[in-house]
Image (cartoon, rainbow, N blue to C red):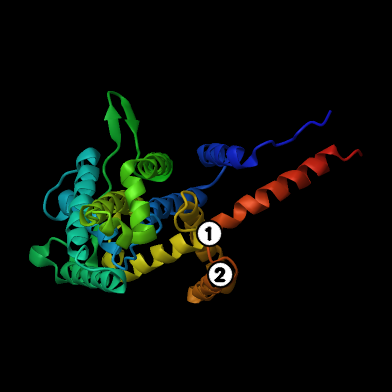
């Protein structure tokens, strides 16, 4: 009788990765915890972008609006306009900002399609950045950024828990990622998700069947804005600063590349792309020095575009069975 080893690696691998992420702070240093928190934050952002790009087929160059402006909403509430340090209020305000901006941008963009829609999102990102630099009434601090926005530790009686820096923020970001991922899975299985996919595949056919696709596009922008706002909140807490670079259109272009690198339209692809980019940028900087890491990352994007046009993630299911069978033969080999 043959004993099958590792019967379903595709199902076991996510649980193994989750267990590793949960245990990682116990045997790693602060810098690695910071890097993985950064990667988890970009993973949330990439999932929000992929809802629009990979699942609905809408290309946006202005997603920095949904990432940076909610972070600035936190900065205004916590520092420049008010002095609110309640984390629930700050995160709630960021979420509301992402939803409202998503609905507004979605409504504007619903009047156009294709490359013209992408140009509109680019223009809106530029307008947002100009607003931040103009520093109306001193609420954005212009190019000086807003600092000191991190909420205080959560205190219950004599017990204090710091969820907004270090290991605490790591677990908070991981929890948000799991919630967003579960929500994305449920959304894509719902009727809304089916309509999003139909818009991606053939919007003209939907229109001919009598569907009004504009409300669904606005909904997709709103949901994407909410998810991106979570990422913006976490990165603001991580660095304890909100800067104009967060609303630069290049942030939207970077998250597009991350999503394409990992595999657009897949749940795990944007997460994988985020980890690849963050760690490539970090370790390539130490190897080649200075800003030369962009050449390494650029070469990686070119290789993926040439040889893996669907991204890295679609290739993995073909590699896992080969890896599993090779490991099984290795374990069965007699000494």
Residue 26 screen position, x and y as percent: 54, 38
Q: Please provide percent x and percent y for residue 210.
A: 23, 54
Q: Position of residue 102 (x, y in %)?
A: 22, 56
Q: Is residue 279 left or right of residue 223?
A: right
Tell me, yes or no, if residue 254 can be seen here. yes
Per the rendering, the mark at residue 276 is 1
Q: Is residue 222 left or right of residue 286?
A: left
Q: Which mark is residue 12?
A: none
Depth check: give the residue in front, 238 or 329. Answer: 329
Query: Which residue is the site of mark 2?
Result: 300
In the picture, the quarter occupied by the N terminus is top right
Which quarter of the rendering shows the C terminus? top right
**Secondary structure beneath disc 2?**
helix
Looking at marks 1 and 2 on the same chain, the residue that comes earlier in the sequence is marked by: 1
Q: CA distance from mark 1 to mark 2?
A: 10 Å
Is residue 56 in view from this perspective?
no
Between residue 237 and residue 123, name the one nearer to us: 123
Q: Are marks 1 and 2 in contact (CB under 8 Å)?
A: yes
Query: What residue is rendered at 33% in x and 57% in y?
Result: 199
Q: Answer with left or right where residue 302 lies relative to residue 85.
A: right
């Amino acid at each position: 009788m043959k004993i099958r080893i590792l019967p379903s690696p595709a199902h076991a691998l996510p649980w193994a990765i989750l267990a590793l992420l949960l245990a990682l702070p116990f045997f790693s240093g602060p810098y690695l915890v910071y890097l993985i928190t950064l990667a988890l934050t970009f993973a949330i952002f990439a999932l929000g972008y992929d809802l629009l790009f990979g699942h609905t087929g809408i290309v946006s160059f202005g997603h920095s609006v949904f990432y940076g402006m909610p972070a600035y909403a936190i900065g205004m509430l916590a520092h420049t306009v008010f002095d609110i340090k309640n984390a629930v209020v700050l995160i709630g305000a960021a979420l509301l900002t992402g939803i409202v901006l998503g609905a507004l941008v979605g409504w504007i963009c619903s009047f156009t399609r294709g490359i013209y829609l992408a140009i509109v999102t680019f223009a809106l990102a530029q307008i947002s950045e100009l607003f931040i630099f103009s520093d109306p009434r001193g609420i954005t601090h212009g190019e000086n950024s807003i600092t000191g926005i991190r909420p205080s530790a959560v205190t219950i009686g004599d017990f204090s828990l710091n969820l907004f820096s270090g290991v605490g923020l790591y677990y908070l970001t991981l929890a948000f990622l799991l919630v967003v991922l579960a929500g994305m899975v449920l959304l894509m299985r719902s009727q809304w998700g089916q309509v999003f996919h139909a818009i991606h595949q053939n919007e003209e056919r939907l229109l001919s069947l009598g569907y009004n696709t504009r409300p669904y596009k606005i909904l997709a922008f709103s949901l994407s804005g909410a998810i991106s706002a979570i990422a913006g909140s976490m990165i603001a807490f991580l660095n304890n600063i909100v800067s104009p670079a967060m609303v630069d259109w290049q942030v939207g272009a970077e998250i597009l590349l991350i999503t394409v690198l990992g595999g657009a339209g897949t749940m795990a692809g944007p997460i994988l792309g985020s980890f690849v980019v963050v760690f490539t940028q970090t370790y390539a900087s130490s190897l080649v020095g200075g800003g030369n890491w962009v050449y390494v990352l650029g070469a990686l994007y070119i290789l993926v575009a040439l040889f893996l046009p669907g991204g890295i993630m679609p290739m993995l299911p073909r590699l896992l069975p080969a890896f599993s069978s090779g490991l099984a033969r290795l374990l069965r080999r007699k000494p």
